[in-house]
Image (cartoon, rainbow, N blue to C red):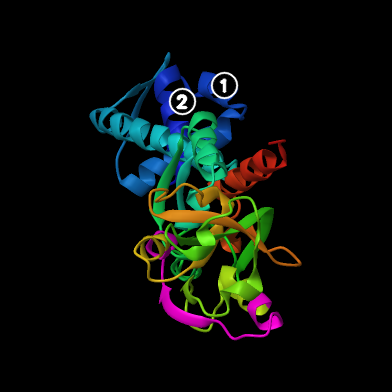
Amino acid sequence: MDLRQLRYFLAVAEAGHITRAAERLGLQQPPLSQQIKALETELGLVLFERHARGVALTEAGRLLQSDARGLVEGAAALQQRMALFAAGQRGPLALGFTSSAAAHAFVPRVLSACRRLHPDIALELSECNAAELTEALQAGRLHCGFLRVPVARPEGLDFETLFDEPVLLVLPLDHPLAGAEGEPVPVALLRDERFILVRRPGAPGLYAELLQRCREAGFEPRIAAEVPRMLTNLNLVAAGAGISVVPASMRGVHAHAIAYRELAAKPALHAPMTLVWRRNALPGPTATLLALVRRLAAEPG
C-alpha cells in the first residue's frame, strides 16, 4: 500500500464511480480498477460494493477512508513544509555569536530583520566565545554564527568577513594614559603594561595584531590574564587588573571606570565582523540568513 493507491481510493470514494474518478485523475478506467483491486487484495478486504450506478463504500471502506484522508493530507502538509525548508522559509536556525560581535548594532539588526521578514524561521540563539562557537558549528550544534577573528578554520566551515571596525585601547579610568582624550596612544608607551586578552592559549584571535605591534615596538607584552569573553575582559580592566583593546562598538561599557582611547599603530588595528556557517547546513534557513546578512552588510551606514 502506498500513497498513490490511497489517493486513488479516495478519488473513487468521493466520485462514487470508477470511470468518473479516472477522468478526474487523468487515468484510464482499467488501470484505476487494477490499483483498487490490488489495494483490496493487499488489505484482504472488500472496499467497494459495485452496483449499476457506480460503487459504494463498504464498512471497511468507510474506516479506510477516514484514516487514508489523514495520511494523504499529512503527506501533502509534510511535502509543503519540506518545500518551505528547501526554500529557506521555514525550520530551525541555531545561531551563535560572541559578546563582542553582539555588541555591534549590526547583529541585532540582522536578528530583527530575520524575525520580521521570515517569521517561520525559528531562531535559536546562544552566546559563546569564538572557540566554543567554532566547536559547536563543527559538532553540528549550530548552523551559523557571528564572531570577530577566527581562532581555527576546521574543514566543513566557511568564513566570510563582512566589514571591519576600528580597535580602541581600554584602560582603567585612573590610568596615567587615560587622559588627553583625542590623542592616539603610541604602542611604545605600553611597554610596562599588563595585558588582558580574550583568547584561547595559542590562538591569538583578535589580539594577534596587537601582539605583533608590541613586538615591532621592541618589547614582548606581559600577559596578565587570558579570559574567554570580551565582557570579562572589560570587567577586569574596570577593576584595574590591566589594559586591553576592544572593537570600537564596545565603547561605553563601564564608562564610569574605563577610558577608551585610540591607539597609534601602523597599520591600524582593526576588528572584523565575521560570518561563519556549516557548509552542510545549506540549503534551508541558513542560506536565507546568509543572503540577508550579505544584503544588510552591503547597505550604507
Number of dots carrying numbers? 2
Span colored in magenta: 213-233
Across and down, in percent, residue 126 comes to: 39, 54
- Looking at the image, which residue is at 65% across and 75% down? 188
Q: Which of 219 and 281 is in front in this view?
A: 219
Q: Name the residue under label 1.
A: 24
Mark 1 or mark 2, which has the lower sequence index?
A: 2
Quadrant housing residue 281: bottom right
Q: Which amino acid does label 2 sit on?
A: Ala
- Looking at the image, which residue is at 50% across and 29% down? 116
Across and down, in percent, residue 194 comes to: 47, 77
Does 197 sit left or right of 262 as displayed?
Answer: left
Q: Mark 2 points at which residue?
A: 11
Q: What element carries label 2?
A: helix
Q: Is residue 28 visible from the viewing direction of this image?
A: yes
Magenta highlight on residue 218: yes
* Relative to 209, residue 109 above or below: above
